[in-house]
Image (cartoon, rainbow, N blue to C red):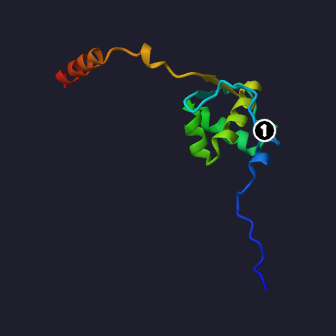
Amino acid sequence: MTPPLRRERGLVRPYVVTDGRAHPTRNTLDLVTLVNGTGSRPLTGLSPEKRRVVELCRPGALSLAEVAGHLNLAISVTKVLVSDLIDSGHLTARAPIPRTELPDARILQEVLDGLRSRL
C-alpha cells in the first residue's frame, strides 16, 4: 500500500503564481534593479503573491534579488510579478547607481577619517 500523497503547505506552482506566463513584460529588470512601492494604489484585486511584493517594497527600495529571497520565489517568477506591478502602478523601478558615478574611494576615506576625528 502506498502512502497518501502529501500536499506541501504553501506550495504553489510557478505558472499559477504568474498566471501561466514565463516572461515579464519588461526586459530591463535584472537582479540589482531597485523596486519601491508607490503606496498610491489599493491592494484590492491583487493575488496574494503580488500583495506580498507590494507590502515588502512599500517601506523602501529593495533589489529584485532581495524581493525574491524574502518571498522564497524564483527570480524568474519575481520578475514577472514585479513587471506586472510596475505596469499597474503599484511599484516603481530604477537601475542602481552605476559604479562609474560613485565618488572616488580617496574622498570617501577622507570623509570617514574626518568623521572619526570628531568622535
The structure residue drawn at horizontal position 75% and vertical position 80%, both measured from the top left corner, is 3
Q: Quadrant of residue 8?
A: bottom right
Name the kind of residue labelled 1 in the image. Answer: Leu
| Picture coordinates of residue 11, whole percent (x, y) | 71, 57
Q: Quadrant of residue 116?
A: top left
The structure residue drawn at horizontal position 36% and vertical position 14%, both measured from the top left corner, is 103
Q: Is residue 7 above or below residue 74?
A: below
Q: Look at mark 1 in the image and give the residue it sits on.
A: 46
Q: Residue furthest left?
A: 117
SS type, badge 1: loop
Of residues 55 and 34, the one drawn nearer to the viewer in this rendering: 34
Q: Is residue 77 left or right of residue 72?
A: right
Q: Is residue 91 left or right of residue 119?
A: right
| Picture coordinates of residue 73, whole percent (x, y) | 64, 46
Of residues 31 and 82, the one drawn nearer to the viewer in this rendering: 31
Q: Is residue 64 left or right of residue 106?
A: right
Q: Residue furthest bottom?
A: 1
The structure residue drawn at horizontal position 57% and vertical position 21%, both measured from the top left corner, is 95
